[in-house]
Amino acid sequence: MSRAADNDRRGLREYEAAGQFEADAFAEAVLDIVAQIPPGLVMSYGGIAAELGSRASRQVGKVMAHYGSEVPWWRVVHSDGRPADGHEDEALASYRAEGTPLRHSPSGYRIAMRDATWRR
């Protein structure tokens, strides 16, 4: 098992042990945070997990993969500023429309996390 996967499980267990976890409640909490992210700003999967008192960033990703189409999904990114895998072109159109700070390189683009990260 990878260290990241182990950390996600540990974070999810901590959330569960605190008596706050139900799958539906976790998903609802994730989607609620994403719905609040202002245009032009982003949060990382790990940042959302941390807001929920968890380290389960992969679980946040799973929620987004299954239910994220109802919220501004492009505002949730990897910690290095990469958009959701497989959705780079569609996300780029949204970032440009919203004025999200970007960094461009020969290999593509990333969100300028220092300038674009939303902190509640």
Image: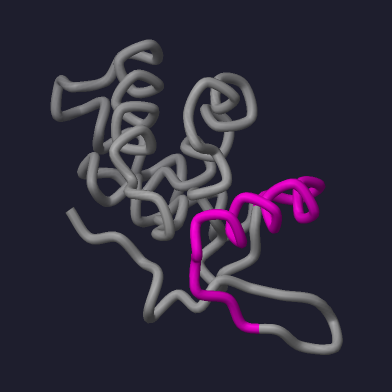
Q: Residue furthest right?
A: 106
Question: Residue 11: horizontal and vertical position, in percent?
Answer: 34, 44
In the rendered view, does 109 fall on the left or right side of 26? right
Q: Residue at x 50, y 36 (%)?
A: 72
Question: Residue 105: horizontal and vertical position, in percent?
Answer: 76, 88
Of residue 100 and residue 78, the one placed in the foreground of this image is 100
Q: Residue furthest front?
A: 97
Question: Residue 12: horizontal and vertical position, in percent?
Answer: 36, 35
Name the quadrant containing residue 81: bottom right
Question: Residue 89: horizontal and vertical position, in percent?
Answer: 80, 53
Q: Residue at x 69, y 58 (%)?
A: 92
Q: Residue furthest bottom?
A: 106
Q: Residue at x 41, y 43 (%)?
A: 56
In the rendered view, does 4 fall on the left or right side of 46? right
Q: How many marks?
A: 0
Q: Is residue 54 above or below residue 35?
A: below
* Region of the chain picked out in magenta, as a range: 84-103
Q: Is residue 56 above or below residue 112?
A: above
Q: Residue at x 30, y 15 (%)?
A: 25
In the rendered view, does 115 fall on the left or right side of 86? left
Q: Is residue 98 magenta?
A: yes
Of residue 28 and residue 42, the one placed in the foreground of this image is 42
The colour scheme applied to this rendered structure is: one colour
Q: Is residue 116 magenta?
A: no
Q: Is residue 61 above or below residue 109?
A: above
Of residue 80 and residue 17, the one placed in the foreground of this image is 80
